[in-house]
Image (spheres, grey):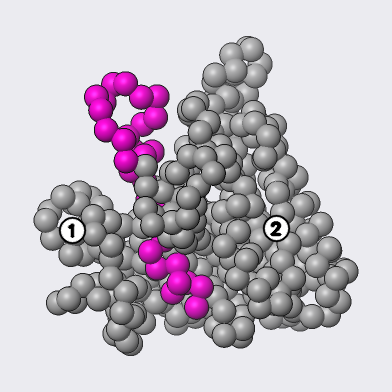
Amino acid sequence: MGVLLLHGMSDAPYSLHAQAEYLQKRGVWVVAMRMPGHGTIPSGLTGITWKDMAAVVKIGMKRLTQKLGDKPIHIMGYSTGAPLALNYTFTALEDTTLTLPSSLIFYSPAIGVSKAATFAVWQSRMGHFFALPKLEWNSLEPEYDPFKYNSFAVNAGDQVYRVCKKVQKQFDDYHKETKHTKDFPPVLSFQSIIDDTVSVSDTVNHLYKRLPKGDHTLVMFDINNHFSKNLLVKETVSSTIQYIKQNSGASNYQFDLISDMNSTDGTLKLITNNTVVKNLFYIWPKSLFSLSHLAMPMPNTDPLYGDKNAAKSPGIKLGHLAIYGESSVLGISPSAILRQRWNPFHTYTKERVLEFLELQ
């Protein structure tokens, strides 16, 4: 089989390199695309369009089809890679010249972003028109990450908003059509219940609850409930988490919650449609209170983003960056340093992917 890997906005193919490696070792033909505007300098994001990126998805699928013929080809997308994969899938359902993916696998899918993005684009256009380039940016930060832009262009956010909006229109059109000649491929997603980059509720309501009934699964990771007992978690965050747990189930897909709720020893449990299915024998690492958007696809062994026991990095090590001093000295924000960058349960997600692809 083949798997096409699609990275997110401001990101790089490196974000899914761990998945590429374990799939390739099992004989899978893997193609990882680098999107337009990426891999150079952040200003590459000021002029790209989501349609440029959608064209790249077609190129990748065409390449895999040339190599594999009629063998199954799957798409794995991280963040913005998810709506790009969905856009291609809807197009392939109608266009017989395109290869329909056999399944879709998503990490931290960007199905919904802030509605402010639709107005922020005018800020960017004014900056361009009046030669005030700083208006074209949501943030301008030091670029110390070798595989991800820290600075983020307003246009980049606008393009994510536009492709998400396009996918919702495609869902509308799909549901209006009463007869479908092709089945919608199965979808497996991994999502942290708390994600400051994308809307988790949109993953539930605007993706999974809109999918036709099928072999779809949403795997969501709860926060560390043992940590949260010390009452440091914001009340608004706790309320959001509770709402998502209560409103994530539906009859057309399977909802798996990975949580240590009501666990006396901290062991994680697999809770499927509100029923405990089994103990997973994973526990939260000490001092880690949640996963994040960035952490979902990344193993703890990654030299750059992994934990303190990971292999030595050839340069900076961001996954366990512990530096101390006065708060006003560095040009790096404390929140950027503290954000979780590796997934302690990566082995579990790997097993789920291999099972999903029938490679286990």
* Residue located at (77% from left, 68% from top): 92
Residue 303 magenta: no
For badge 2, the amino acid type reads Ala
Q: Residue at 64% across / 65% down in the picture? A: 20
Q: Which residue: 17% across, 76% down? A: 265
Secondary structure mainly formed by the magenta segment:
loop
Residue 100 in the image, given as x and y percentages of width and height:
75, 72
Where is residue 309? Give x, y as percent: 38, 57
Foreground residue among 299 and 112: 299
Q: Residues within 10 Å of mark 1 (few under 14, many from 20)?
A: some
Determine which of the numbered discs, if any, sits on residue 248 in the image: none
Q: Identify residue for label 2.
A: 32
**In the figure, 324 relative to 198: above or below?**
above
**Which residues, given as a range, are shown in magenta?**
322-351
Marks 2 and 1, the one that precedes in the sequence = 2
Amino acid bearing label 1: Ser
Does any portion of residue 240 appear in the rendered image? Answer: no
* Residue, disc 1: 228
Residue situated in front as seen by the camera: 277 or 23: 23
Instruction: Judge from the rendering whether residue 30 lies leftward or rightward of residue 288; answer left or right.
Output: right
